Image (tube, rainbow, N blue to C red):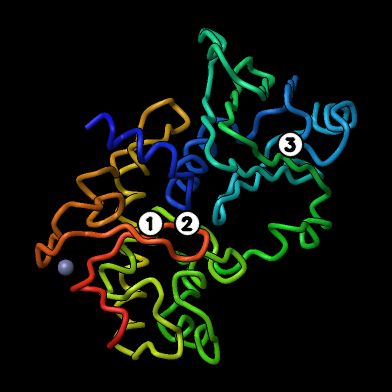
């Protein structure tokens, strides 16, 4: 069991559900408060020198917190603060009575003495810019549609896939197409739709696209409902409830497929690993 958890830990990062849960919790705690102090140990994550960042952000009031894809959009008076957790980060709330976590690289303290710390596993982005410039941001300016956006309908998804070449898994992971799906949730999304990750987009039938659409939404909604991945912490330091029991084939190589009992395989698909049931997800149809 321990080995299984460790194997996952090195492979997961935060995807749409984790950012959605974090964004909602942050909204409840920090909106309406003013930034009074900021500490950044790893200034490489900033898009400006620390002194400029500090001078700009201290005194700004937090107006809203939204998540899109793997990003948080923290709206201040005149600025927008963009955060991406890279391979994963603990973003943890504190009150004036709490002891700060032992390790963190970033700390925001607010005017009531509360705030949050960020501990990053590998790297993160913390970019500050004027709101009107945010459309030109090199990452978020080109983010695709959120799969939970009300405009992401089945018809819209079909239109997106029209005339596209390439393989379906790569398409789903490209943040410029759909924002927020990564190599964790994509596994069961494809499995539910009985699609091999290497299926070419033009080969997909209307029924397969409809099943994939349904699966994308249900996997994400179920994880949000359970508080995100069991391997990531939320704003209060609690782990989510979406873990090995919820995964159908993800990270379950060597175990039987829940549908047909064929042994699940782990294969290489370009630069990412994929988990497939060779019976339920045939490549040649
Ligand atoms: Zn199967």
- SS label for mark 3: helix
Q: Which residue is mark 3?
A: 45
- SS label for mark 2: loop
Crowd around label 3: few <14 · some 14–19 · many ≥20 (10 Å): some
The residue sitting at 41% across, 35% down in the picture is: 232
- SS label for mark 1: helix
User: What is the distance, in whole Å, between disc 3 and disc 2 at their CAs?
Assistant: 21 Å
Q: Which residue is mark 1?
A: 185
Answer with the quarter of the image where residue 54 lies.
Answer: top right
User: What is the distance, in whole Å, between disc 3 and disc 1 at their CAs?
Assistant: 26 Å
The residue sitting at 36% across, 41% down in the picture is: 8
The residue sitting at 22% across, 56% down in the picture is: 248
Q: Which residue is mark 2?
A: 182
Between disc 3 and disc 2, whose residue precedes?
3
| Label 1, ligand 1: CB separation under 8 Å | no
The residue sitting at 75% across, 19% down in the picture is: 37
Between disc 3 and disc 1, whose residue precedes?
3
Are discs 3 and 1 less than 8 Å apart at CB?
Answer: no
Crowd around label 1: few <14 · some 14–19 · many ≥20 (10 Å): many
**For ligand 1, which image quadrant applies?**
bottom left
């Amino acid at each position: 069991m321990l080995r299984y958890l460790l194997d996952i830990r090195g492979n997961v990062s935060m995807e749409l559900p984790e950012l959605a849960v974090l964004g909602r919790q942050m909204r409840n705690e920090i909106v309406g408060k003013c930034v009074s102090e900021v500490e950044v140990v790893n200034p490489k994550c900033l898009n400006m020198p620390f002194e400029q960042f500090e001078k700009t952000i201290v005194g700004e009031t937090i107006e809203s917190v939204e998540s899109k894809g793997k990003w948080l959009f923290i709206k201040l008076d005149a600025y927008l603060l963009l955060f991406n957790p890279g391979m994963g980060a603990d973003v943890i709330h504190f009150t004036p009575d709490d002891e700060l976590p032992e390790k963190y690289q970033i700390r925001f303290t607010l005017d009531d003495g509360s705030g949050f710390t960020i501990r990053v596993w590998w790297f993160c982005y913390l970019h500050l810019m004027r709101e009107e410039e945010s459309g030109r941001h090199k990452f978020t300016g080109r983010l695709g549609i959120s799969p939970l956006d009300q405009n992401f309908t089945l018809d819209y998804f079909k239109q997106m896939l029209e005339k596209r070449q390439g393989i379906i898994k790569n398409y789903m992971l490209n943040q410029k197409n759909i924002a927020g799906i990564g190599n964790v949730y994509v596994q069961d999304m494809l499995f539910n739709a009985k699609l091999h990750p290497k299926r070419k987009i033009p080969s997909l039938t209307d029924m397969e696209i409809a099943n994939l659409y349904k699966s994308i939404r249900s996997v994400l909604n179920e994880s949000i409902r359970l508080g995100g991945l069991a391997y990531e912490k939320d704003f209060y330091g609690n782990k989510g409830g979406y873990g090995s029991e919820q995964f159908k084939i993800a990270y379950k190589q060597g175990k039987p497929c829940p549908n047909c009992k064929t042994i699940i395989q782990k294969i290489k698909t370009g630069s990412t690993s994929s988990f497939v049931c060779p019976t339920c997800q045939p490549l040649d149809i």
